[in-house]
Amino acid sequence: MITICGAGAFGTALAVSLAKNEPVTLWARDPDHAAEIRATRRNARRLADIDLPENITVISGPLTAGTDPCLLAIPMQKLGGFLTGFGDSLANRPLVACCKGVDLATGLGPTGLIDAACPGSTAAILTGPSFARDIALGLPTALTLACADESTGKTLQSALTTPNLRLYRTTDTIGAELGGALKNVIAIACGAVIGAGLGESARAALMTRGFAEMNRLAHALGAQPGTLAGLAGFGDLALTCTSDQSRNYRFGLSIGQGTDFDPSVTVEGAATARAVLARATAMKIDMPITHAVTALVNGELRVDQAMDMLLSRPLKEE
């Protein structure tokens, strides 16, 4: 049996898809939320019109220890605290992070947090271009499963592939998690330029130069050259920067339009921009778009000022 921790939209969608293969346990942080889902067989707070299969068991409270895989659909900035609180129950089992970002407190990605908090477990990450609703509806979706242990990676790939969810495997956890984290920063920038009415050409430029920026940092941190050209990098970037289903893109839109954004919606790219800029600055890696997004998120620049800053940079070869 597979356990999924986190009853948000993505955790619920994964449960619906994986229930086609075997029984699934879905853990919710809030006991009242778990009770609502059990009573209605729907997650009204996140995926209101999706019925949960009967072989999904919804729980809250303590987790049962075991050796079966556990998927961690926990927001990035809350993952470290979750791992610390439930470390005994998570020990000695494959732990698959299903979040994207960089932890502000430690500068680590999801697999780094898992390795630090649960050294007896095998860390992996599931990432790539996907929206929870598409997965829950059974629409075809392809993702990257990254696990440094090749044998465990193969086992997880087989266990987590479903009729609508196709997984491609890699051992490059660094590249996979950086692709998923950094594309959220670029998505905020793209949303901001569209929201400010600066046009599709500006978005295309940001996506292209943003992709170069993503690769610059990833390669410096040891990612394999081809990883960001795949689903975990380019694929996720293309989806997130062009669809208003993306929370990061919508957040950027609100910045560009000068409107308020729902504070209850998780926007991983905002914290990631701050964490990545600090790391890049320390490593003397030039990341101008990340710099501009951090300034926008902090309220230090307007969108027009950020674009002027980017457009006034010295001319150079591509």
Image (cartoon, grey):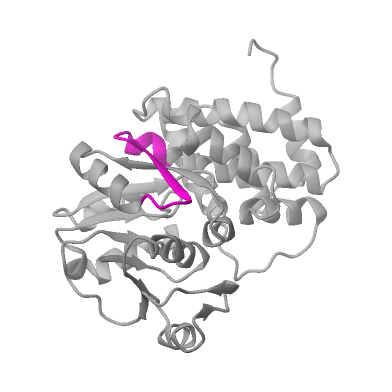
Residue sitting at the far top: 317
> Which quarter of the picture shows residue 225?
top left
Percent across and percent down for residue 206 are 68, 32
Q: Is residue 181 above or below residue 250?
A: above
- In the depicted view, which residue is nearer to us: 278 or 53? 53
> Which quarter of the picture shows residue 2?
bottom left
- Residue depicted at x 37% and y 61%: 79
Side of 119 where 228 appears, left or right = right
Q: Is residue 205 above or below residue 304?
A: above
Side of 45 where 232 appears, left or right = left
- Residue depicted at x 81% and y 40%: 304
Q: Can the viewer see residue 148?
A: yes
- In the depicted view, which residue is nearer to us: 59 or 210? 59
Percent across and percent down for residue 223 are 37, 29
| Image label count | 0
Side of 246 where 111 appears, left or right = left
Looking at the rendering, the stretch of residues picked out in magenta corresponds to 161-177
Q: Can the viewer see residue 108?
A: no
Percent across and percent down for residue 158 are 29, 47
Q: Is residue 128 magenta?
A: no
Residue sitting at the far right: 197
- In the depicted view, which residue is nearer to us: 47 or 53? 53
Q: Is residue 165 magenta?
A: yes
Side of 115 where 210 appears, left or right = right
Which part of the image, by quadrant, shows the N terminus? bottom left
- Residue depicted at x 74% and y 46%: 192
- In the depicted view, which residue is nearer to us: 301 or 261? 261
Q: Is residue 155 above or below residue 317?
A: below
Which part of the image, by quadrant, shows the C terminus? top right
- Residue depicted at x 67% and y 68%: 262
